[in-house]
Amino acid sequence: MKNLEHDFVIVGSGLAGLAAAYYASQFGSVAIITKAKLDVSNSYYAQGGIAAVIDPEDEFENHIVDTLTAGRGICDRDSVEILVKEGRDRVLELIEMGMHFDKEDGEFVLGLEGGHSKRRILHSSGASTGRDLTKFMVNKVKNLPNVTAYESTKAVEMFVKDNRCYGIKAICFDDMSTINFKSNIFIISTGGLSRLFQRSTNPYTATGDGIALAWNIGAKLVDMEFIQFHPSALMIPGHDAFLLSEAIRGEGAYLLDKDGTRFMEKIHPLAELAPRDIVASAIYNQMKKDKVNNVFLSMKHLNAKYIKNRFSNIYSEILSRGIDITSDLIPIAPAAHYMVGGIQTGLNAETNIQGLWACGEVASTGVMGANRLASNSLLECLVFAKRAVENSSKFVSHPKIEFNTQPIVYKNKNVELFLKYKNEISDIMSNHVSLVRNGKDLEKAVKRLKEIHDLFRDKKEEYNFAKINNIADISFLIARSALIREESRGGHVREDFPSPNPNLEVHIVQQRNQEPIFEKVRK
């Protein structure tokens, strides 16, 4: 068992974690704990781009209003203003650092995506923005002498005394050893949890680890019912969902029903460019009406040469599965994509636990509301990672609490049991807590998830049992919050409560050993 000390301990290596490590390196030694490799994250797979007000004809207020509109009344306006105004500075800073975004005739190519009133989406290599940006930041961080990456290492427990976080215990998968990390500053940036669902656009690592870490030490979670389902994920039986960027519809692609007829024009004035919660629900309803498992995305009417160049990686990936996106209809269906809620933070990414900050998809900063506006996520990573570091850096020189722990117990014989319950929980989430919900199904989910949690509540000393407990906990919190919110709003759709309820324009806050509460939105 190793005992290590760093000024900053960052859990997670998506864009938020990498950005936090980069900024934190100016103030002290930094540890990045990641259970896979540095470049395995939701950020890496982000295709759409990064939104920023850099066009002279665009204005901050336009981007703010678009974000608030997409958020369906649940965004905190002060957070949104910070995102938009500081976001431009962070993007320009990236460019100064050497990050390349697509240009044409010397000017940035600005894309349009659902919910945006102006072209403001910067892309890299067509639809490979997340990959290029993540690689760029990985290279920046790897060259910093005071940043140490602990790959194939998973944080499994955090330690708190007098409401202050002082340590993390982790398991290194290379040799199954235990590592204790001591610090005054812990930044959780572990990404989302959409792999809890059977059909997801996320990498296998997105199972809500950071949410569980924070929940177990008493951190407040907020808006857990809002899970965003991406409208356009490839639907081929027997294959994983593959994300087809929002930017495809931004360039003019059509959504077609089984008969080849457009259906979005009758549903929203923006048709295929409506915010993604509306598009996802429309696709779900169309599939239900036609009794089919997919609708179609069509680019047959667009310039084939342009599409191949603009979406080169998507073109190659889908072609490898026997579909030419320039000439064939592309079968798609919604898939779990983005966790809108998460660990509740203030304007500086701080949580209610001293010594603990959160940024990126794992956090709920107040920006996303009930439905994330397309291409705001990478922007949020940059803005609030920097704020987390600036706010926490003043604690670098404070004395640290000493602590000792027991080594993590890992029994290979329990892996099969973990997989059994993991698959059952995935079935529950996909069948009862998916894109369209109802009270009866949610009650079933809450009941069974609580039963699973209770089975393993006192068995946390073994790694596999602790994992079962954590995913049952997180799934329960999503289902319970969805049951409480008796309305349809943004990414939360209740067929038994199909309309928004003005009285529920609030955040739902959950904290361990306490009943959920409503909290006012900061208008």
Image: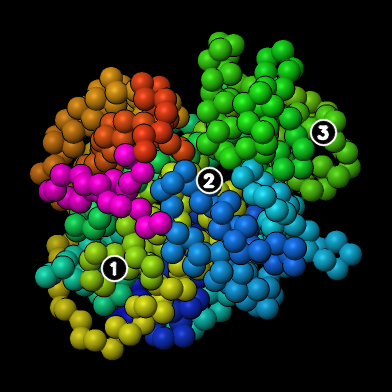
Which amino acid type corresponds to the residue marked 2 in the rendered image?
Answer: Ala
Q: Residues within 10 Å of mark 2 (few under 14, many from 20)?
A: many
Q: Quadrant of residue 496?
A: top left
Query: Where, quadrant-wise, is the N terminus in this rendering?
Result: bottom left
- In x, y percent, where is residue 412? 27, 43
Q: Report the front residue among 111 and 195.
A: 111
Q: Secondary structure at mark 1?
A: strand
Number of the front mark, 3 or 2: 2
Residue 70: numbered disc: 2
Q: Residue at x 29, y 83 (%)?
A: 395
- Can residue 301 be seen at all in this image of the molecule? yes
Q: Taking 19 as reference, is 431 left or right?
A: left
- Closer to the chain start, of discs 2 and 1, is 2
**Residue 240 visible (yes or no):** no
The amino acid pointed to by label 1 is Leu
In the image, 272 versus 5, the foreground residue is: 272
Q: How many marks?
A: 3
Distance from Cα at disc 2 to Cα at disc 1: 29 Å
Residues shaded magenta: 503-523
| 197 displayed left or right of 246 | left
The residue under label 3 is 326
Q: Amino acid at mark 3?
A: Thr
What residue lies at 51% left-to-right and 51% top-to-bottom?
A: 68
Label 3 sits on a secondary structure element that is loop
Residue corresponding to mark 1: 356
